[in-house]
Amino acid sequence: MKIIVCMKQVPAGTTAEIDPETGAMKRSSAATRTNPYDLFALETAIRIREQVGGTVTALTMGPAQAEEMMKDAYAMGADDAVILSDRKFAGSDVLATAFTLSQGIALLGGCDLILCGRQTTDGDTAQVGPALAEYLGIPHAAWVAEITGVSETSISVRQDLVSVSQESELLLPCLITVDKDINVPRLPSYRLKKATEARPVKIFSYKDMPEQDMSKFGLLGSPTNVVEMFTPKPAEKQVEIPGSNGSEQAQALFDILTAKKII
Amino acid sequence: MSFLKFDMEKCTLCGVCVRQCPFQGLTIESDGIQVNDKCRLCKLCIKNCPQDAIILEQKSDAFDKSEWRDFLIYAEQVQGEVHPVVSELIGEARKMAAKAGFKVHAVLAGGPGTRENADRLLRWGVDTVYVYEHEELAAFRSDVYTDVLADLISEIRPCSVLIGGTALGRSLAPRLSTRFHTGLTADCTTLDILENTDMVQIRPAFGGNIMAQIAISHSRPQFATVRYRVLDRAKPVEQITGKVVIRPIPERMMDSRIRVIKAEPIKRVRTIEEEDILVVAGRGVKNENGVELCRKLAEALGGQLAFTRPMVENGFGDQPHQIGLSGRTVRPKLIITCGVSGAIQFTTCMTGSECIVAINNDPEAQIFKVAHYCIRGDLFDVVPALTRLVENRKED
């Protein structure tokens, strides 16, 4: 089975610099890590390969620095890694990102199964997976909690949709976004790290894309645009709870909450 | 923008393009080949046409916004009941519709019994409720539901489509916005509409304490998702004026590459969204001992303990108890945050709370910007002291 795992490098901390002009995130300076949810997707892919055979390719759109993340993917067990990187891709929203990834997948000759994390920790939208499935015209299942079966033509999954636990069979090719806790991602192995040291990470740019229409990529291809950024207003009435120690502060808060019938 | 054009001089209606299209985007009609909204512009038809009768035309972005009118609300059902977020979306849409001179429509899609929920939506002031009822729609399947909604959107051409930011809504909305090659703004916290019918969509931006205003100015419809408990619920109308329209379901609309094997209800537990009192443990509680102190306070108050994302990542809590963009949005009567720094991804999902108390030993912590009551002190002293006071009160 040919499996592609979509991954993303995200800021390591909770703060990131925003370009006031475009509203896009500046990624160059900040420390980064692999989006933690993507590790569950990669682990799922590797386990499916171990079960039925095939290849696992890690795919990302981002700056060339994503190579570091891809090396880690190799050390976890990915066979191949591809970065779609071009200044023309900068400022992509959901639609442009999904389109670019679909182009990358076309470039790789398609696949049987695409795995994504449930969402990223920076954008937090959880939209790119389903949007990518729509671009490829394939079915998807989001928030998958368990893979219940894999065959040559289909995959069965269990999703916990808040009040319903649903088990479905999807015909391949299809896309699945996996929930946290579907498995415990393995740590990068030292042996694989050494063995894959010389294995290159492929980088493709705009000129490699099958579709040579610039208006479909990056900021140009993004129907949403940021009008302005602003700091939210602080809470209307703020009260400092007095007290020189914890007990006094607790007493002062308790008195207020009781008087206001909040507790 | 580009689209397909058929040279009818050359076309012999051989049907090769219709059969080759991987997306069922083409149909043979009495007046030639028609392109529908499933077309992805993959150009396979152009390559395969034996007559070279298909051309790709590029056209400048000259669409007419005035052709796209009214609001459409996706009325999600959970086990046969309308999800409460629907009333919130309707309430907000009615406010905007009044400004723009628009109507508010809603769409129900589901299994047998779906029609019965339409009357409830009418009471909230919806002008038209469109109903798609079919046994095959009883369980959610991403491809079929997308086809159903796309069918209605193509028909009524709404200016905006509002969808609840639920597990199901967040799976459906991006497929739809992609099908219509338009924008989707996730997790809006405020919505408004301008005179030119562009929505003003406010949502938290990545990192830092920043909000972003997002516009979808050059395409329609405008898609937005809003989480449950972010907006105010719709008030019922005194007199129902809306109507119900049952939509036909052609068999091919139920074609799917997904087969539901089984669907079972999950046993209901009181979720943190439904709780009146929440205590939140953030990174400042440090360890299991700190978490226990917070849990005792939550128990004494008769509420639940919730967590920030780093705490869940470190295994102190689980996803259903996580507050934030990657977790849940809450609006309790009282929320006490302990050792929470207050990143925007967290605060966005709890600022609707009636009373916010922040306990943090960092006097500059972001959380104090949203708190009503600020305790700049050590939670390891304050929390146990507060717990004792609450417990003793109960004994009185």
Image: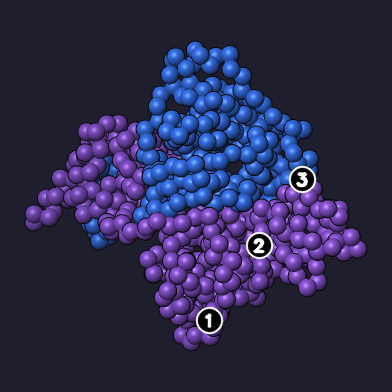
Chain colours: A blue, B purple
Q: Secondary structure at mark 2?
A: loop
> Is residue B187 or residue A60 the one in the foreground?
A60
Distance from label 3 to label 1 (Cα)?
A: 41 Å
Q: In the visual, does A163 lie left or right of B28?
A: left
- Residue on which disc 2 sits: B221
Per the rendering, the mark at residue A215 is 3
Q: Residues within 10 Å of mark 1 (few under 14, many from 20)?
A: some
Q: Secondary structure at mark 1?
A: strand
Residue B171 in picture, x, y percent from top left: 51, 53
Front residue of B158/B340: it is B158
Q: Residue furthest left?
A: B396
Tell me: residue A46, above or below residue B144.
above
A243 relative to B9 in the view: left or right? left
**Residue B255 sits in which quadrant?**
bottom right
**Residue type of the residue flagged with mark 1:** Val
Residue in the foreground of this view, choosing between B229 and B1:
B1
**Crowding near the residue tagged with mark 3, few <14, some 14–19, many ≥20 C-alpha atoms within 10 Å:** few
Quarter location, residue B376:
top left
Amino acid type for the residue under numbered disc 3 = Ser
Is disc 1 on the same chain as disc 3? no
User: Which residue is depicted at the point 72% across and 64% down?
Assistant: B27
Q: Are marks 2 and 3 on the same chain?
A: no
Q: Where residue A206 appears, x then y in whole percent?
A: 74, 34
Give the side of residue B202 with respect to residue A147, left or right.
right
- Residue that lies at the very extreme toward the right in this rendered image: B9
The chain containing the residue under callout 3 comes to: A
State which quadrant residue B235 falls in. bottom left
Whole-angstrom CA distance, mark 2 to mark 3, is 19 Å
Q: Amino acid at mark 2?
A: Pro
Q: Residue at x 34, y 48 (%)?
A: B320
